[in-house]
Amino acid sequence: MPSAAHSRVPSAPQPPGFRMPPAAQVARLMADPLGFYEAGRRRFGPIFTLRYPGLPPEVCVATAELAEEVFATDGGPGRAGEMRRAFIGPLVGEESLLCLDGDPWWRHRRLVSPPLHGRAVASWADRIAEIAVAEAARWPVGVAMPLRPAMERITLEVIIRVVFGIEDARRLGALRTLLPRLMRLAGSAALVRIPPNARERALASPLLLRAGVLPTTRYVRARDEVDAILYDEIARRRAEPDATAGASDVLSQLVAARDEEGAPLTGREIRDELMTLLAAGHETTATSLAWTFERLVRTPHAMDSLVAELTSGPSAARGGSSARGDSPTGRGGSSAGRGETSYLDAVVKEGLRARPVVLGAPRLLDDTAKIGGYEIPAGWYLSASIPLVLSDPEAFPSPELFRPERFLAEASSPEAVARANRAWIPFGGGRRYCAGAQLALLEMRVVLAEVLRRVTLTAARPEAEKRRLKNVTLVPARSALVIARPREGGASW
Ligand code: HEM
């Protein structure tokens, strides 16, 4: 926690907030997080304070401009790592990019970022496509099926094979079972509800770890099984540097990486970063894909435009996309001009906007920060509310509509597109901007394209799916229930 030395009486007022007791605020937040944030915006405007029992107050902001001010604290008093350590530390470890701050964070970020850059991940497009096609080939025809677990299988396979670089069939099989179990146990209410001190004690006590009924023991056993495989893979790559030189998977690149002093990451640091990429990149990407399909099957004009682009020949389907200069599926070829956004790109952006999966990008302040004319004291949380910024009607007119055209210069004015892009913060911002954003965007483009070229999807029920909080992500309440059928004249399997 921030030192008391920084705490002083602020000279400016703090943002307004509800008068109800902190216990009532947390109850409303747990029951309906989006509704509660919306109520805060309606009542107080774009910056307000929420209070929870036993925790520092949280200042939430709801516009792009204020979010930029929050992200600017990354260069000063904002601590994102300390904020996350309490709830995700046991899974990802103390040496994780998610949980570090200051110089140790920067050292890790510099080593973890290069293998996840746009150009590096673009080379994975064909393997991601293979994984997506193999998954879709197994779907039942003409009956309701939940897409979120299907998307989880795809994104898990991408992490194991592309990020961890594991191809050995026995290990692949083991990790396919072990990793979901580990994530389930780490996020289980039984484990999360144990107060951090008691949890630390239970995790460190050999005696308590013999009690198989305890959630901490079940978790540690699953973690140890996963760790045994990961440490073995790390040792194997260290022992065979020539065999892994030039390998494109993240694990091989982390083993080869050296910091400014020429020092490699330790085995523990690499293990923690692998768990970080799993924890940060698996469910988020799968849920974002599930939501994008959920929106598409309820927005016929968007589905028709997308399918027309994807099935109108290789040039249009693979044609130029985006300011990043990638093709829409990330799979080579570029017929349209650079800087243009394909409809597929616009669908991905709108999916992430209309149904963001992450609730906020919070920072814990270790010194006062001035935001929107207010002075926020040291020791408070300061958070860019991702769903509020992404539904700000100033940036996204009629925010409740799924309208990919809002990102297309030919359908909206350049000013409107610029405004929308500025407020588009599904991946957070500042120095702590999502390290896996390029991989997530590539996965979304490739999976949407490969699936929709081969199958038609319709909603299993007409009504939109409600948003439900699962651990810290917002998931579709019915797991994106759809009916799939082979597309007539669709791409080959
Ligand atoms: C659609 C999918 C994803 C979404 C919506 C998402 C969103 C986010 C958000 C909101 C943050 C916090 C940013 C902030 O505090 O300003 C974050 C951080 C992070 N994400 Fe993602 N993410 C996604 C996929 C991925 C993937 C695929 C990976 C890697 C495999 C990844 C790795 C990370 C890491 C390592 C961080 C911590 C960065 C740091 O603190 O320096 N994410 N992500």
Image (tube, rainbow, N blue to C red):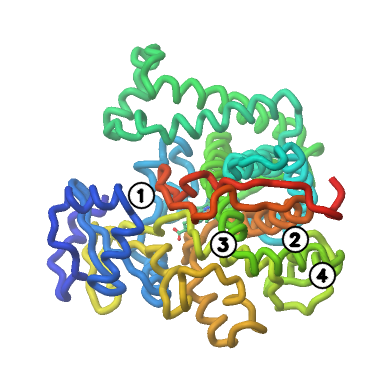
Mark 1 vs mark 2: which is more N-terminal? 1
Asked if marks 2 and 3 touch (Cβ < 8 Å), the reply is no
Mark 2 vs mark 3: which is more N-terminal? 2
- Front of the two marks 2 and 4: 4
Residue matched to label 2: 329
Mark 4 vs mark 3: which is more N-terminal? 4
Residue matched to label 1: 82
Residue matched to label 4: 316
- Estimate how packed mark 3 is, as few (under 14), some (14 to 19) or many (20 or more) residues with alpha carbons within 10 Å: many
- Residue type beneath disc 2: Thr
Callout 4: helix, strand or loop? helix
For the image, the number of numbered tags is 4
- Residue type beneath disc 1: Glu
Q: Is residue 257 left or right of residue 480?
A: right
Q: Quadrant of residue 305?
A: bottom right
User: Which of the pair 310/349 is nearer the observer?
Assistant: 310
- Residue type beneath disc 3: Gly
